[in-house]
Amino acid sequence: MTIPASVDPVRIQEVLDGRWAHVRRAVREQLDDAAFTPVPGESMAEARARTTALAGRLAGTDAVTLGFPAQYGGRDDAGGSVTAVEMLAFTDLSLMVKAGVQWGLFGGAVQALGTRRHHDEFLPAIMSFELPGCFAMTETGHGSDVQQLRTTCTYDPATETFDLHTPHEAARKDYIGNAARDGRMAVVFAQLITGGEGRGVHAWLVPIRDEAGNPLPGVTIGDDGPKAGLLGVDNGRLTFDHVRVPREMLLDRHGSVAPDGTYTSSIENETRRFFTMLGTLVRGRVSVAGSAGSATKVALEIAVRYGDTRRQFTAPGEPREVVINDYRVHQRKLLPVLARTYALHFAQEELVSAMHDVQGAADLDEAAQRELESRAAGLKAATTWHATRTIQLCREACGGAGYLAENRLPGLKADTDVFTTFEGDNTVLLQLVAKGLLTGYRDAFGSLDGWGKVAFVAEQVRETVLERTAARGLIQRLVDAVPGREDDVALTDRGWQLAAFEDREKHILDGAIKRLRRNATRKDITPFDVFNDVQDHVLRAAQAHIDRVVLEAFVAGIERAADPAARALLERVCDLFALSTIEADKGWFLQHGRLTPARAKALTGAVNELLGELRPHMRTLVDAFAIRDSWLACAILTEEPARQEAMAAHDAATDREMAPAR
Amino acid sequence: MTIPASVDPVRIQEVLDGRWAHVRRAVREQLDDAAFTPVPGESMAEARARTTALAGRLAGTDAVTLGFPAQYGGRDDAGGSVTAVEMLAFTDLSLMVKAGVQWGLFGGAVQALGTRRHHDEFLPAIMSFELPGCFAMTETGHGSDVQQLRTTCTYDPATETFDLHTPHEAARKDYIGNAARDGRMAVVFAQLITGGEGRGVHAWLVPIRDEAGNPLPGVTIGDDGPKAGLLGVDNGRLTFDHVRVPREMLLDRHGSVAPDGTYTSSIENETRRFFTMLGTLVRGRVSVAGSAGSATKVALEIAVRYGDTRRQFTAPGEPREVVINDYRVHQRKLLPVLARTYALHFAQEELVSAMHDVQGAADLDEAAQRELESRAAGLKAATTWHATRTIQLCREACGGAGYLAENRLPGLKADTDVFTTFEGDNTVLLQLVAKGLLTGYRDAFGSLDGWGKVAFVAEQVRETVLERTAARGLIQRLVDAVPGREDDVALTDRGWQLAAFEDREKHILDGAIKRLRRNATRKDITPFDVFNDVQDHVLRAAQAHIDRVVLEAFVAGIERAADPAARALLERVCDLFALSTIEADKGWFLQHGRLTPARAKALTGAVNELLGELRPHMRTLVDAFAIRDSWLACAILTEEPARQEAMAAHDAATDREMAPAR
């Protein structure tokens, strides 16, 4: 069906709002206040003070407490809690990160890793922000490989306390939000040693500042100072010099130490235990992915609306200059990333839903948990790289105006830049996805060093079997309905697109497996090189996998569209996402005989045709993001239309007598 | 020849230093002072004050006056002047831009567009910085299409003055460096009207502030406020309310107005005159391209050196963790962009040389001038996009540390971001290159509105004939020596690579020409769509052209390498540039039968092999950039090696008893 001339953005918004529409509505209302608008040009001290004050305004409200247990005033709503963070990210990103640190990471760790006594004693004050805290995991020397943290926490049965210690500068806690200014306690991750034996990484709740805000004895607090962005977040460094920590402050849900130093855990294997602990913290990654999506939407809203009013260069026979969204190359910049933003939105929504259900299940389904972690890792990488790239494109699409802080884009760019490397470096996350694919999620999370167990991995890799995501039945029907892989199937056939994505994933993965197996038998390379030689291939498999998951989520999401016009528009956006993704990897499809040269050429034509079809709906597509004016803080959006009108009126009145001969 | 185990970076540096090695050496010495190190975390006011003070230190020295006429104390050395700017860009980018505004744009406009009386009266004070000035061309409503500026300057014979006026807000001068704080005069571009007739854009030298720094009557000065970066540059807005400008202040080299209002110019055609005026300002674009290169080199130096010390994840049987530069995927990130940085360096060097010779020639060679402008436009686009992308990659390659201002990368990223849209929006510049290709430089610069004269263009487009750049003979010999285009030619055969680049350019351009011709005869599309329909195709032609020019410059540049080891290394870097460029556009080569699937697969293998070969030389390749320690201001470079040593010593001493079982 062709797209009707006019589509109501509200109908699209309803589809986007999805399962947590009620949360989105409520938080939109709560945040519809100029106080939440970012303030450009602040000093670091000003930004920190304002951000802390704003966090105080959120304290205790649903916007930050949905995920906590009902008995402490929360709503046990994991999905709602990350949706609320995603909404916060439409406003000030420092505030989003500050809230994420306090209620997501710090509060979330106490909730997930602590037990009843920790909850009773600390959750109320955490939820009310009376107890600002830190999540002190990363060290200067270990960010990605946190299993290898060097901070130690050694149990002493004589005093029934732990000795928390930073042995050298590489072991200091670094980049820790809430540390430089506000934090009074920290969840500190360290190597637990008891009875002279290392038990792997555990977490303790450790006071770091007194009531007056001074560091406690043995605690040295540093400031990470100015950063590229997120000036309102007080990232800092923590060093511990033999700090005494009471035995009860070990967050002991997954491992505990008796007064005599005996260690017990319900999870025998140390590495498995570590990854189970990490797994409970998946919400952080899901929140970052969602927030990246929100920032991307704000940038697109600005670029698309500006591009609809800004004019440059004349066209023959036209009285006014050409609106820049009318240029093919401008459409080529904005529309494919807009389509991908939609696709990622649906994938994110599906991820949040899966997380909510897995975490809310009565019994832990370990396979589902592993798959969830893999999905979260992959989508976090995809959405944050997409954000960095898209915000950059939008900045450039607004020219010099896009470089001025008053037009918001510099802040969006600077604030989200770190998303690609925090809460897991994207490249490392892709590797984690790849390992999941190679092992069918069985032991993928055994260790992230990866290289260490390569021969093992290469032997046990399963035959590739694709597991479909949501709406399996629907997608299978679409794929089955493709008349064949002949060249005469329309490029816009959804089944053909789905099959193409699926086929690419499977083939790349099969190829990587073959190479790994071959390498594992080679005597001429080191064990490290067995895997390293295939690393780029394996990561491509992960990327193809993520693309497939995202397309399937888009297809499933469109099913929610009740309004025919909205549905028709979404179908075209999905076409553009699918075809521009294939076009971007045309080399692979041609190299593997999946596209003939003629069809590859037709593909470029089809993408261009979609750009033309979607051009009249660009504004509708960003309006559907339901971004409040109070969050936009973008001078060009308010000023440019008036300027263009003034110029047109003046030109008409003076008949442009000063203009050069054309 | 294989690369020797050790290559002396000084031998490489000598090749890179090239024709203006003496300038590079002198400016390196002059700037080897911690005062020129960027200062992170400053307020805008602090940054502006410091930048102005530093500019004062440069005033009158060769670093900023080489390009001025000898009779005023300069050295008539155009090439030297842009080389000096390129060196400045290794230090503080605000300083580079501030200097570029004062001596390059403002001083350069007075020099190029003014005549003897302007030179005598103003150049000495401009060179000494006693007269800080602005280059007021861009308006809020017209950045790319400056021929359509709306500011007017109307001659009044009665008073023998001009009336300079901003008719509406879209016509205000915007983003003007030196305007918000320091500028005392401005070169203002406006539509000249005399005798009731528009004569097109001209430039006047206009006082804007009095001695005390207050705006002069009729002049309103605004501040662009905080920006993404370049905080030390005081960009502002200028609005003129019927400001009287003496007749003598018209910079009248290309057009003058007699006391009675009679207009005369040596260039009849108004559009031609306009582009001749613009053409003399090509130095700005060349300087930005060079500066983008310097910033890219600093980022690569940081990422490569950090990657050589930073370790993460263990490898089987290795006592220490793996150095991250050893990972294939990390090499895939850093080495191809490092190779392209080398390639662009040689292309830039060739461009500077061409500019120097064209501008120094006794007679104006208009064709050479047009080709120079096209080359400058294309390389400016290529180098600045490359800078944005590479600095981003380097930031991510340093993880969380890369996000801290103390590690320099945030500043590099923020400061260079605007390079892609200032001194010509990159997309518009590519279009300019494309028009040059379509018309053989004949009338390419007639008008940038482009769309207006499409039918004309489409009819007169010449058959594609590639004109080779430097070292034509050498390149022709290499191409001729290719045994054929058979699949058995080595991928590392330089002639094959050159032929592949050339073939791609020609084919894409031919295709665009065919489509333009076809469109020009169509009755079903608007004149605007005749060109717009092909816009993406035409820009791809421009990009393929630039790639070819860059590869040829690299090949020619290697000829300067006297040292065999240096040469062997450069040859491999050139291979990586050529093959990774082909790999990135594999889709095109496959689609057009230039690569078989088998050869495309081999190509990926060849690139990976080159990564392995170049891995041991990464440090050498960045050392050859000769970046002084005093410019680096990067904490991780000084701190990370010591941290890693401390950790290794501590681990060895404690035998890592706290580490988890592997």
Image (cartoon, coloured by chain):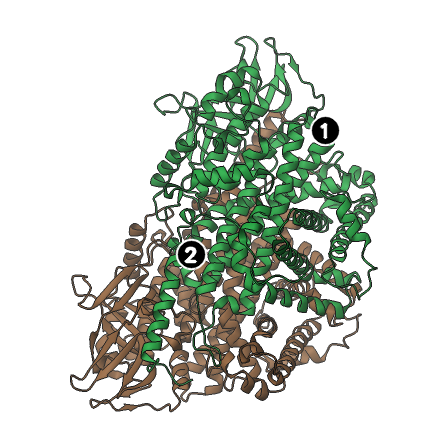
Chain colours: A green, B brown
Q: Mark 2 and mark 1: span between their CA atoms?
A: 49 Å
Nearest the viewer among B206 and B609 is: B206
A430 to the left or right of B626? right
Residue visible at 77% across and 39% down in the picture: A439
Have a look at marks 2 and 1 and say if they share a chain: no
Q: Is residue B465 visible?
A: no
Question: Residue B127 location, x and y as percent?
Answer: 28, 70
Along the horizontal axis of the image, is B180 left or right of A179?
A: left
Of residues A325 and B286, which is closer to you in this image?
A: A325
Find numbered disc 2 in the image and state the secondary structure of the residue it sits on.
helix
Q: How many marks?
A: 2
Residue B580's quadrant in the figure? Answer: bottom right
Q: Which chain is home to disc 1? A: A
Instruction: Tell me the crowding category of disc 1: few under 14, some 14 to 19, or many 20 or more residues within 10 angstroms, Cα based.
Output: few
Q: Nearer the viewer, residue A412 or A272?
A: A412
Does the CB distance between marks 2 and 1 fall below 8 Å?
no
Three-letter amino acid code of the residue under disc 1: Asp
Which circle marks residue B95 in the picture? none
Secondary-structure class at tag 1: loop
Return the x and y of residue A570 as percentages of the image width and height.
63, 55
Is residue A591 found left or right of A281 in the rendered image? right
The residue indicated by pointer 2 is: B415
Mark 2 Cα-neighbour bin, 10 Å: few <14, some 14–19, many ≥20: many
Position of residue A187 relative to residue B335, above or below, is: above
Residue with the mark numbered 1: A365
Mark 2 or mark 1, whichever is nearer to me: 1
Instruction: Identify the image quadrant of the C terminus of chain B.
Output: top right
Q: Amino acid at mark 2?
A: Asp
- At x 38%, y 60%, the residue is B29
Q: Chain of mark 2?
A: B
Q: In x, y percent, where is residue B1?
A: 69, 65
